[in-house]
Image: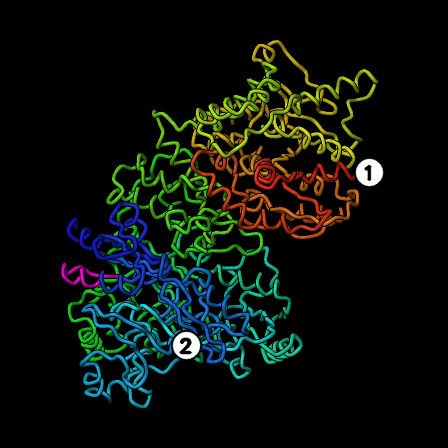
């Protein structure tokens, strides 16, 4: 391997990676399979590709081309050299609106081509659900299709010419009339014309095998078309000329509801004469209960186009009238359509979990039958599932007869793998009996190639092998795929994982307490690799900042997988490779909500750091910022906030403090409040008592416990003060949590605390959510802090009072991290269930209260933890009631607690802020309110833009004060 690496580094201008991280990131795609490559090369151009092929030919090392790594049949993995085209060969070379063609490189992400074509009223026809991260090269390699294939066909239908380099270094431009064909290919075809004319099933989604029938003379001997779907086994693509289609000016989406999937499948083919753009189907099993779909057990998503909204709607309504439906909905609003399409697009991830939370896997992800046979096929498919004791929820391209499904195969035990093989063999026979194709979109890869003789017969498969020999006589390009395949039950990615649960700190309740199962959640669909966010989405800001796979949620999950496997990453929890990949994880928790399978990398990071630094010295930032609550309480006890601020204003002292604390030198140290929120609260009560008042705790409404989080307490007490004023204005009684452990609940208004000698001896304490300890992986300390907090909160938990938390990250820690970290303490769930955001408190306890009318536009960003864990429905309603108009942006502010303050993170932190937040604030009109409920978000705005962001409570309190 050393000689190979040295040879590649000598001739390649792009990156050559033989390190553990580079190899670990490419061991898997989105399939069930895993192969460990020797190295990874990111070619700079076609010359680099040719150089790699020459070196690998000299060393007889296989080469695998890889795009977005979202293949579901295993064809994007290999044991030799993996070519990663996404880093450099990812451009649009040219786009000609007149000829409706574009010249693209293989690493170009589909959405980038769509963005470039849209201003000309054009688009690329095929659009897989992974359109935001799949590449044109991968689409050509798999002959991908997508939801619009009923209108615009497969990728092969959109390919004009292909520039290809063979394993022996021959460069060709493939096209029609034998253009670019390797020597011997024409003789092979002309010697077996009868077989090629009769041996391929006629159906719109026949992807399996080599498309040798495209080389028939009556089909124009189209070498480029026949190359599509060859899965990188014939040559390496370096450039493509593709056809664009005219996009409809307007679209409408008809959502047709049926009693069950069989009824939807039976109806799909009958809608094709109406010229729809899509006919997509899915059943209720895959639809979140919160979605607003018409009532039914299964749905068809039928999109229509037109020159105007009215024309598109008329066509959709015609479809509805023709369809025998239970219920229907027609949507013309683009935002509404996007929301509905996201339900369908997320199914590839959602389907990996059964309704009871158990795992499901690909393997029979995309077989296809003639559309008219779909209903009958699904009945036979369901019967076979039942016979094998398996479960799966079909969905997909009903109009093309193509079905996606994840099945709850047991791929961890010998018996389960045996059943996987038997089911696969029997299902292949069912598909063939219905005149179908084993693959209708994602290719054969390792998952189905072994079964191709059932579909084509041995003589046709032998012809495929001869064709492979013409193109690649040395069998160096993606060996084991399509021809002479590896067994479908070998190289399974789960076989290397530990069979016994790993000892961990968090409970992982959704994964049965098994950290391996939590890591297995990542199936590789790579939604985290999108280069831009839509709407309020967050995941994955560090990947968008760096563009590096290791900084994506998927990349980090792959490294954790390899850490558990112990083959590549051999030092377990002490791994520096895993540590370095997690270093730029902002712990924004965006993946918890935006990932279709709810990977929670923030929790995995905390878990890893906990073990990695066990009994070892930690980074300075873990002591300075990870233990921030301790330091701030010490400042309060010693009354040295003013002194600390003064010292921080002296630049040499500030520089020294930042250096010692592991803080980025570019950062300013935030000023401490000279009077804490609790101090203000006590002073206010004392003044009220002197005046004969009850303490200003509000009217006779419900009691709410206002949580004095560390940031509100010591850094932004004005937020707490504003919240008290608003909550009291809404008629609520406000109290703070006890500071001593009580033997019985507080009395009366909740602020009267009955003390006893024992509680006094225990001393005063402060509740804390443990956030800073959790985010730095100091989980033993976090548990101790949280148990003390639960002790203090016991009297509250014996009442019905909810707990209002102003800081979104603290609320998220209490609602999500607390019960998962203290999974053995029933009080943890009791407190988590009491936690409300500021807006939720008003919505639930004062539903009839009307906030003051502010009537101003707002700008800012929904806090990433609010988006991921808490939700913002109540906030939106409260803003609307107050006349605060406009949408908040998505993404992450980039500061993310301690992340943006840590040395070495400043550039990424700024890049995250520049993605959406800062441009939105800079572009805000005069008089706009900059909303930022999180202290980190407000600090980022202040330090990078000189703008003061405000908590929603502050804005409403100001409105109350206005006459």
Identify residue for label 2: 158
Residue 513: % across, % down? 40, 40
Q: Secondary structure at mark 1?
A: loop
Name which quarter of the figure residue 142 lies in. Answer: bottom left
Label 2 neighbour load within 10 Å: few <14, some 14-19, many 20+: many
Indicate whether 236 appears above or below 918: below
- On screen, residue 22 versus residue 545, left or right, reads left
Measured in 3D between alpha carbons, the distance from the residue under mark 2 to the one under mark 1, in whole angstroms, is 62 Å
Indicate whether 310 appears above or below 866: below
Q: Is residue 299 magenta?
A: no
Is residue 166 or residue 146 the one in the foreground?
A: 166
Residue 53: % across, % down? 21, 63
- On screen, residue 635 versus residue 528, left or right, reads right
Q: Residue furthest right?
A: 963
Q: Quadrant of the C terminus?
A: top right
Q: Which residues are magenta?
A: 52-64
Q: Is residue 58 magenta?
A: yes
Residue 800: % across, % down? 67, 32
Is residue 7 or residue 293 the one in the foreground?
A: 7
Is residue 58 or residue 822 the one in the foreground?
A: 58
Q: Residue at x 32, y 35 (%)?
A: 573
- On screen, residue 87 versus residue 170, left or right, reads right
Q: Residue at x 81, y 15 (%)?
A: 690
Task: Tell me if residue 818 can be seen.
Answer: no
Q: Main secondary structure of the magenta part?
A: helix
Name which quarter of the figure residue 485 lies in. Answer: bottom left
Identify residue for label 1: 962
Label count reads: 2
Visual colour scheme: rainbow
């Amino acid at each position: 391997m050393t000689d190979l690496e040295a040879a590649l580094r000598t001739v390649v201008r792009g990156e050559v990676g033989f390190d553990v991280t580079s190899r670990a990131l490419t061991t898997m795609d989105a399939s069930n399979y895993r192969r460990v490559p020797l190295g990874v090369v990111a070619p700079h151009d076609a010359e680099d590709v040719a150089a790699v092929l020459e070196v690998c030919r000299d060393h007889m090392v296989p080469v695998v081309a890889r795009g977005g790594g979202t293949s579901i049949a295993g064809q994007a993995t290999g044991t030799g050299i993996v070519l990663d085209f996404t880093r450099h060969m990812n451009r649009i070379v040219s786009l000609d609106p007149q000829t409706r063609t574009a010249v693209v490189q293989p690493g170009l992400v589909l959405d980038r081509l769509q963005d470039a074509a849209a201003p000309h009223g054009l688009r690329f026809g095929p659009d897989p659900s992974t359109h935001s991260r799949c590449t044109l090269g991968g689409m050509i390699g798999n002959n991908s299709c997508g939801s619009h294939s009923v209108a615009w066909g497969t990728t092969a239908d959109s390919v004009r010419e292909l520039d290809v380099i063979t394993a022996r270094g021959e460069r060709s431009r493939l096209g029609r009339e034998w253009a670019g064909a390797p020597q011997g290919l024409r003789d092979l075809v002309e010697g077996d014309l009868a077989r090629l004319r009769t041996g391929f099933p006629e159906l719109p989604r026949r992807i399996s095998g080599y498309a040798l029938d495209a080389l028939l003379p009556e089909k124009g001997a189209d070498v480029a078309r026949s190359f599509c779907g060859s899965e990188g086994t014939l040559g390496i693509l370096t450039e493509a000329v593709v056809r664009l289609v005219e996009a409809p000016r307007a679209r409408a989406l008809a959502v047709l509801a049926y009693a069950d999937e069989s009824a939807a499948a039976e109806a799909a083919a009958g809608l094709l004469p109406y010229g729809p753009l899509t006919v997509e189907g899915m059943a209720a099993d895959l639809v979140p209960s919160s979605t607003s779909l018409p009532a039914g057990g299964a749905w068809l998503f039928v999109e229509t186009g037109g020159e105007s909204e009215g024309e598109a709607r008329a066509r959709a309504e015609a479809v509805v009238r023709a369809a025998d439906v239970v219920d229907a909905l027609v949507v013309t609003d683009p935002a509404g359509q996007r929301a509905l399409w996201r339900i369908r697009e997320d199914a590839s991830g959602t389907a990996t979990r059964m309704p009871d939370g158990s795992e499901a896997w690909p393997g029979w992800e995309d077989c296809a039958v003639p559309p008219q046979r779909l209903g009958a096929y699904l009945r036979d498919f369901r019967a076979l599932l039942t016979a094998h004791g398996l479960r799966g929820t079909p969905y997909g391209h009903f109009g093309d007869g193509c079905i996606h499904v994840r099945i709850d195969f047991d791929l961890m035990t010998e018996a389960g793998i045996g059943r996987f093989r038997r089911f696969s063999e029997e299902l292949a026979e069912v598909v063939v009996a219905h005149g179908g194709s084993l693959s209708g979109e994602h290719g054969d890869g390792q998952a189905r190639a072994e079964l191709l003789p059932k579909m084509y017969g041995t003589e046709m498969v032998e012809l495929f092998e001869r064709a492979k020999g013409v193109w690649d006589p040395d069998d160096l390009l993606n060996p084991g795929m399509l021809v002479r395949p590896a067994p479908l039950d070998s190289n399974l990615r789960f076989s290397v994982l530990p069979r016994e649960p790993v000892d961990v700190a968090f409970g992982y309740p959704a994964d049965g307490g098994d950290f391996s199962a939590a890591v297995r959640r990542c199936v590789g669909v790579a939604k985290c690799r999108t280069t831009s966010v839509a709407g309020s989405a967050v995941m994955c800001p560090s990947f968008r900042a760096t563009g590096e796979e290791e900084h994506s949620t998927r990349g980090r999950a792959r490294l954790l997988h390899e850490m558990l496997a112990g083959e590549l990453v051999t030092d377990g929890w002490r791994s520096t490779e895993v540590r370095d990949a997690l270093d730029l994880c902002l712990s924004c928790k965006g993946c918890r909500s935006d990932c279709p399978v709810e990977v929670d990398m923030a929790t995995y990071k905390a878990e890893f750091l906990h073990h990695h630094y066990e009994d070892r010295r930690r980074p300075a930032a873990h002591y300075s910022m990870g233990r921030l609550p301790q330091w701030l309480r010490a400042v309060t006890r010693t009354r040295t906030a003013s002194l600390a601020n003064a010292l921080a204003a002296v630049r040499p002292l500030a520089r020294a403090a930042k250096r010692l604390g592991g803080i980025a030198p570019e950062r300013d140290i935030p000023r401490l409040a000279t009077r804490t929120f609790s101090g203000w609260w006590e002073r206010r009560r004392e003044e009220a008592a002197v005046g004969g008042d009850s303490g200003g705790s509000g009217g006779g409404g419900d009691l709410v416990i206002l949580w004095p989080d560390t940031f509100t307490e010591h850094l932004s007490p004005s937020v707490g003060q504003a919240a008290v004023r608003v909550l009291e204005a809404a008629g609520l009684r406000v109290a703070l949590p006890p500071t001593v452990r009580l033997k019985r609940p507080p009395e009366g208004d909740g602020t009267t605390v009955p003390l006893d000698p024992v509680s006094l001896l225990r001393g005063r304490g402060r509740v804390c959510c443990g956030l800073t300890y959790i985010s730095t992986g100091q989980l033993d300390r976090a548990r101790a802090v949280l148990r003390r907090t639960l002790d203090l909160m016991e009297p509250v938990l014996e009442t019905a009072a909810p707990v209002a938390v102003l800081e979104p990250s603290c609320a998220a820690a209490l609602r999500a991290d607390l019960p998962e970290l203290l999974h053995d303490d029933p009080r943890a769930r009791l407190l988590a269930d009491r936690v409300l955001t500021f807006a939720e408190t008003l919505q639930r306890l004062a539903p009839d209260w009307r906030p003051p009318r502010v009537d101003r536009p707002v700008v800012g960003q929904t806090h990433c933890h609010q988006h991921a864990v808490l939700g913002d429905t109540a906030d939106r309603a409260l803003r609307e009631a107050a006349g605060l108009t406009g949408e908040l942006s998505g993404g992450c502010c980039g500061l993310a607690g301690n992340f943006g303050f840590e040395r070495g993170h400043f550039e990424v932190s700024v890049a995250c802020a520049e993605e959406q937040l800062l441009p939105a604030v800079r572009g805000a009109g005069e008089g706009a309110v900059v909303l930022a409920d999180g202290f980190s978000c407000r600090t980022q705005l202040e330090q990078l833009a000189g703008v003061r962001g405000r908590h929603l409570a502050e804005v409403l309190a100001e409105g109350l004060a206005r006459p």
